[in-house]
Amino acid sequence: MDKNTPLIQLEGISFSYTPERPVLRGASLSLMKGEKAALLGPNGSGKTTLFHLIMGLLRPLSGTIRVFGSERVAARDFHEVRRRVGLLFQDSDDQLFSPTVAEDIAFGPFNLGKNRDEVLRIVHQTLSLIGLEGFEDRVTHKLSGGEKRLVALGTVLAMQPEVLLLDEPVIGLDDEHRSRFTKILRDSSLTFLIISHDHDFLGEVAAGKFRMADGAVVRDR
């Protein structure tokens, strides 16, 4: 893929949950390799909807979605996208469904066809990265909110994605877990797009900004 080709490119995207209330009206966005950008906008402006369209969880009424240089239209076109783009949901409980932390983190790599030894190595490396060494056998639903958030991030990172889409990643976190989350992203070499209303956090991890208003996306200069 040419280095000047955006990793994610949306052109003229329109979407509506109900005919009388359009959410996106001709929205366009380009995210280049290496970018670390924020996606800003008031509640209800379509930020999460945009993420779900990129991942193929929703289908646009019109417009073009290109990811990694290829147009994505049919459901099968998004299988590759979901392997190479990691989406962190706003609610960690939407992401965590296995009995233990190790099983949650191992789920993605096993689905990618990794063998048991590879998966064990990935689980160990991921827990070390998110600062939860020794949590392998902890029961996921009994973790604190901050610990759940880190494990949810771990399930995404264990897939070894090239791009991260992060939906309100530090909302409700205490100072310790917010600081840990911030360090992980600041040290990361991954391309990412973050939805957050925490401007201090964004100032620490994001270099660029997109703003959503009236169904459109505008890049801050």
Image (cartoon, rainbow, N blue to C red):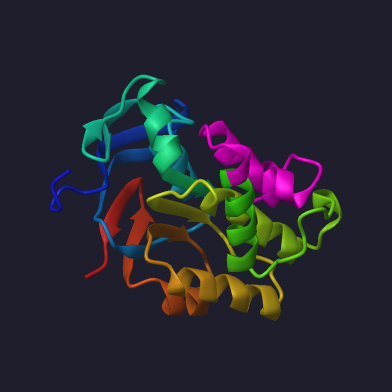
The relative height of residue 47 versus residue 70 in the rendered view (above or below) is below
- Residue 70 x/y as whole percent: 23, 32
Span of residues in magenta: 91-117
Q: Does the magenta stretch include residue 101?
A: yes
Instruction: Write the residue at 56% across / 59% down.
Output: 168
- Residue 25 x/y as whole percent: 31, 39
Q: Which residue lies furthest to the front in this view?
A: 117
140 and 41: which one is in front?
A: 140
Quadrant that contains the N terminus? top left
Quadrant that contains the C terminus? bottom left
The relative height of residue 180 versus residue 25 in the rendered view (above or below) is below
86 relative to 136 in the view: left or right: left
61 and 184: which one is in front?
A: 184
The relative height of residue 95 versus residue 60 in the rendered view (above or below) is below
Instruction: Write the residue at 39% across / 39% down.
Output: 54
Is residue 74 visible in the rendered image? The answer is yes
Is residue 90 visible in the rendered image? The answer is no
201 relative to 124 in the view: left or right: left
The relative height of residue 95 versus residue 219 in the rendered view (above or below) is above
Q: Is residue 143 magenta?
A: no
Instruction: Write the residue at 31% across / 48% down.
Output: 216
- Residue 117 x/y as whole percent: 61, 44
184 and 133: which one is in front?
A: 133
Total of numbered circles in the picture?
A: 0
Instruction: Write the residue at 35% across / 65% down.
Output: 36
